[in-house]
Image (spheres, rainbow, N blue to C red):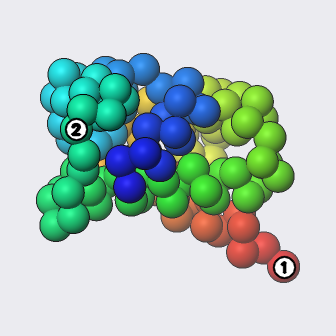
Amino acid sequence: MSAAAVKAGEILGIPNAALARILGVSEATASRLRQGNYRLRKGRKEFELAAFFVRLFRGLDAITGGDDVASRSWFGAENTALRGRPVDLVQTVGGLVNIVAYLDSRRARL
């Protein structure tokens, strides 16, 4: 889960400070995570948040057809349905949950 969260953050252009807020860890811990010197552990809140963040990334990746530039653009752009920029909203648990629900609803369209 650690590597997947880091990779998603890199592709979406998320700096350490924002990744730290998304995962509920310190900025120093986020830095160690990116360097491979820290591993998320099952059963901890940070692992659960990372799993949700990876789910967000995978949903967005499916919608954009694997286009990293399009994913990064969507993530940083104002979204009227979400009432903000996903990059900002995702830094709270409520925002993370809302974005995942939104992406799930977009993928489930018939």
Disc marking residue 110? 1
Alpha-carbon neighbours of circle 2 within 10 Å: few (<14), some, or many (≥20)?
A: few
Q: Which residue is mark 2?
A: 38
Quadrant of the frame with the C terminus? bottom right
Q: Amino acid at mark 2?
A: Tyr
Q: Is residue 51 visible?
A: yes
Mark 2 or 1 closer to N-term? 2
The residue mark sitting in front, 2 or 1, is 2
Q: Position of residue 60 (x, y in %)?
A: 66, 51
Residue 97 visible to an observer of this rendering: no
Count residues near mark 1 (Cα–Cα under 10 Å), then give few for <14, some for 14-19, many for 20+.
few
The vertical placement of 11 against 107, above or below, is above
What residue is shown at x 19% (from left), y 22% (from top)? 28
Q: Quadrant of residue 23?
A: top left
Amino acid type at mark 1: Leu
| Residue at 44% over, 30% down | 88
Please give left or right for residue 31 compared with residue 44 in the image: right
Query: Judging from the image, what secondary structure is the residue with disc 2 in?
Result: loop
Q: Quadrant of the N terminus?
A: bottom left
Q: Secondary structure at mark 1?
A: loop
Q: Does residue 76 appear left or right of residue 26 in this picture? A: right
**Front in this rendered view, residue 17 or 78:** 17
- Label 2 to label 1, Cα distance in Å? 41 Å
Q: Which mark is residue 6?
A: none
Up the image or down, 46 lies above or below 18; here it is below
32 left or right of 66? left
